[in-house]
Image: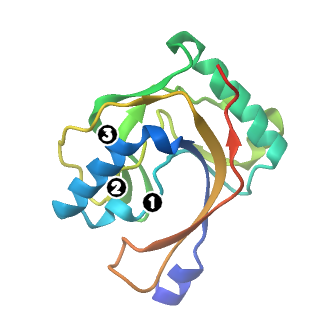
Amino acid sequence: MDTQEKAKEISRFIILIPHRDSIKPLVEFRQKLFAAGYPGAWSFPVAAPLASVSRSFNRDELKALARDIRFLTKENDGKISVAGTLNSGPVLFEQMALFGPALNLPITQETIPQTARDKILRLFSPPVLCAALVDQEDPIEAPALSFRAAALANLTIRPLTEGEAGYSYEWKLGPLVWLPKS
């Protein structure tokens, strides 16, 4: 694939974004990863992709998904938490995989609103809170964190032709839809 074709390649995701007050440990961890030589530490937003989609969800579909996700967290006192170890998540772009702590959030086809199920290309379960995009996995201790406040959004992302090959992307977030209070 030449660089012009790659620049036109657009991927769409539904993502879960933790509230900014709860992600300080993950941001500090990303800084450490970047300093340790992980060039993909800033290539993806601090978010957990839930699904790859063919078309963006509309606001009502995001609201319904937010309610369903909140329901999934009831057994954990409304919290979404992560384990203290890193997982390599799904491969998103050619050889690049999400790298970060997995969320205790079992996303299934039934979690997705009926009206949006035909838009799903691939579900990511458990979702991985992205600390970096990597082309290999190294065992590193990740910060443990949990959060109640989170939002859903559509994400459109495409590779850039400039920058370090495989690590440069531009992304656009759609409007946020917050999970209801627990």
- Residue underneath mark 1: 44
Say which of 174 and 87 sits in front.
174
Q: Look at label 3 and name its amino acid.
A: Asn
First in sequence: mark 2 vs mark 1: 1
Q: CA distance from mark 2 to mark 1?
A: 7 Å
The residue at 69%/58% (across/down) is 174
The answer to the question of whether label 3 and label 1 lie on touching residues, with beta carbons closer than 8 A, is no
Residue 33 visible, this orientation: yes
Up/down of 119 relative to 74, above or below: below
- Residue underneath mark 2: 132
Q: Secondary structure at mark 1?
A: loop
The residue at 74%/57% (across/down) is 55
User: Residue 58 location, x and y as percent?
Assistant: 81, 49
The residue at 66%/49% (across/down) is 153
> Which class describes the residues within 10 Å of circle 2: few (<14), some (14-19), or many (20+)?
many
Q: CA distance from mark 2 to mark 3?
A: 11 Å
- Residue underneath mark 3: 87
> Which class describes the residues within 10 Å of circle 1: few (<14), some (14-19), or many (20+)?
some
Up/down of 119 relative to 182, above or below: below
User: Residue 96 location, x and y as percent?
Assistant: 37, 61
Residue 114 appears left or right of 22: right
User: Residue 13 location, x and y as percent?
Assistant: 61, 53
Q: Can you name the residue that lies furthest to the front here? A: 21
The answer to the question of whether label 2 and label 3 lie on touching residues, with beta carbons closer than 8 A, is no
Q: Secondary structure at mark 2?
A: strand
Report which quarter residue 33 is drawn in: bottom left
Q: Look at label 1 and name its amino acid.
A: Phe
Q: Can you name the residue that lies furthest to the top here? A: 75
Residue 8 appears left or right of 43: right
